[in-house]
Amino acid sequence: MKRHELTDEQWELVSPLVPRSTAETGRPAKEPRLMLNGIFWILGTGAPWRDLPERFGSCKTVHRYFSNWRRAGVFAAIIETLQVKLDKEGLIDWELWCVDGANVRASRAAAGADKKVSNCTPTNRRTTRWVAREAGLDRNSTWSLTVRELHLPSK
């Protein structure tokens, strides 16, 4: 088994969640395990899709499977199944469970660049600058917290 690929035990756990093609015409569908391994290789290495090794097939095909499965909620179902399994085994500390957002890309406007907005629509929100002060940053820092009114349903 190569790095970033599912073991037989892991595949047995997630295989019921991965859709299989039922089409009877056209090209035969690719093996779902191979497509999932290709997706995990991309996600695990951070490489561009075009750098996907040939053993997984065409990068366009693997990307199409990734997009379709993402839209269908396959990955959310896999995460949920793994969470339930690990929770039953007592291996998840729900106080610490989180998603790593260290690699989230921000827009140019988040760094202070001008926003491309038409003049007829007001888009400025009320912001508080105390976050920069609390973080020990200068007053001209771009750190800010957007304040929005929370609409709760009436009882």
Image: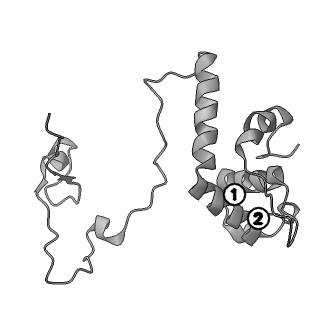
Instruction: Tell me what residue is drawn at x 80 percent, y 35 percent.
Output: 12
Q: Residues within 10 Å of mark 1 (few under 14, many from 20)?
A: many
Which residue is the extreme one toward the bottom? 119
- Secondary element at tag 1: helix
Is residue 46 visible to us here? no
Q: Is residue 60 above or below residue 70?
A: below
Is residue 115 found left or right of 29 in the rendered image?
left
Give the label on residue 117, or none. Answer: none
Residue 22 showing in the rendered view: yes
State which quadrant residue 38 falls in: bottom right
Q: Amino acid at mark 1?
A: Ile
Is 96 placed left or right of 12 in the picture? left
Front-most of 18 and 4? Answer: 18
Residue 6 locus on image (x, y percent): 79, 42
Q: Secondary structure at mark 2?
A: loop
Q: Which residue corresponds to mark 1?
A: 42
In the rendered image, which residue does mark 2 sit on?
Answer: 52
Image quadrant containing the C terminus: top left
- Name the residue at 76% across, 68% down: 61
Q: Residue at position x 59%, y 15% from top?
A: 90
Is the C-beta separation of discs 2 and 1 under 8 Å?
yes
Q: Residue at position x 87%, y 71% from top?
A: 27
First-in-chain label (2 vs 1): 1
Q: Nearer the viewer, residue 83 or 72?
A: 72
